[in-house]
Image (cartoon, helix red, strand yellow):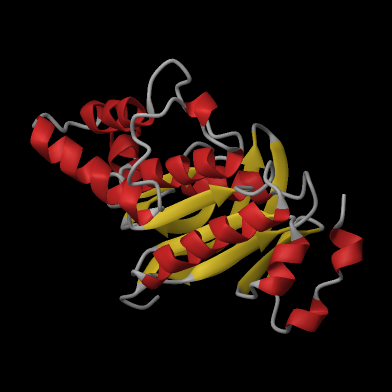
Amino acid sequence: MTLDTIISFQDCSIMQKDNLILSDVTFTISRGEFVYLIGRVGSGKSSVIKTINAQIPLRAGEATVSGYNLTSIKKSQVPFLRRKLGIVFQDFQLLTDRSVQANLEFVLQSTGWKVKKAIDERIGEVLERVGLGYKGYKMPHQLSGGEQQRVVIARALLNDPEIILADEPTGNLDPETSEGIIGILQSISQSGRAVVMATHNYTLLKKFPARTLKCCDGKITEVDHWEEIDFDALKD
């Protein structure tokens, strides 16, 4: 493991309750890397994301995420780990009864921010980062699906995380909008954050190639050559 390694899994078993989902999971991800996690629905992509996020306990193997050991992490440490992670959901999970600004204020206030000027400045920064610097007053229903997903990315960036975990972030978006979201996520990785994107949108993979880990037959394997991916076999 190098100094730049931010996620490391070694001989891990990933479980959902008592069901073994993936075995012998071994991979590392460095700061600034953009990595696809691919596979059919039910192949274990979301389970990997939830294990990195300490939502699913790691019962076997050794894994570290942002300096936290997932095999020995205490329940009291999990919130501190999660502050180093930004999560981008497929279904947005925005609070529909309040504006974009108020959605982001809620996150910052719940993580200890108290000074209004600092809160407003940080929200302005992240909205500008995703191209929505002028839409903080809007309600979520007044935004397109792509704009709502940009708000979700802005929300994920609020506390300056070391890692972005994106679970099917383009699943509800049209192709053109999806390309814009990929562009934002790749630019975020270029700023030094690791980005892990679970997807089965293989059109995007072909258009925006990057390092790829494949979940298949209870294992995770590295795709060494793009031509090795059988896109038709991975379709659901």
Is residue 157 placed above or below 2 in the rendered structure? above
Residue at far top of view: 97
Is residue 156 placed above or below 194 in the rendered structure? above
Any part of residue 222 in sight = no
Q: Is residue 16 left or right of residue 230?
A: left
Any part of residue 36 in sight = yes
Residue at 55 percent across and 40 percent down: it is 89
Is residue 235 placed above or below 99 in the rendered structure? below
Give the mark count: 0
Q: Position of residue 200 (x, y in %)?
A: 74, 55
Place residue 187 in its image quadrant: bottom left
Q: Quadrant of the N terminus?
A: bottom left
Is residue 228 placed above or below 121 in the rendered structure? below
Q: Is residue 122 left or right of residue 200?
A: left
Residue at far right of view: 232
Place residue 105 in its image quadrant: top left
Which of the two residues, 11 or 64, is positioned nearer the viewer here?
64
Q: Position of residue 84 (x, y in %)?
A: 32, 49
Residue at 81 percent across and 79 percent down: it is 228
Q: Is residue 89 left or right of residue 136?
A: right
Q: Position of residue 214 (x, y in %)?
A: 71, 64
Q: Position of residue 6 (x, y in %)?
A: 38, 65
Residue at 76 percent across and 64 percent down: it is 203
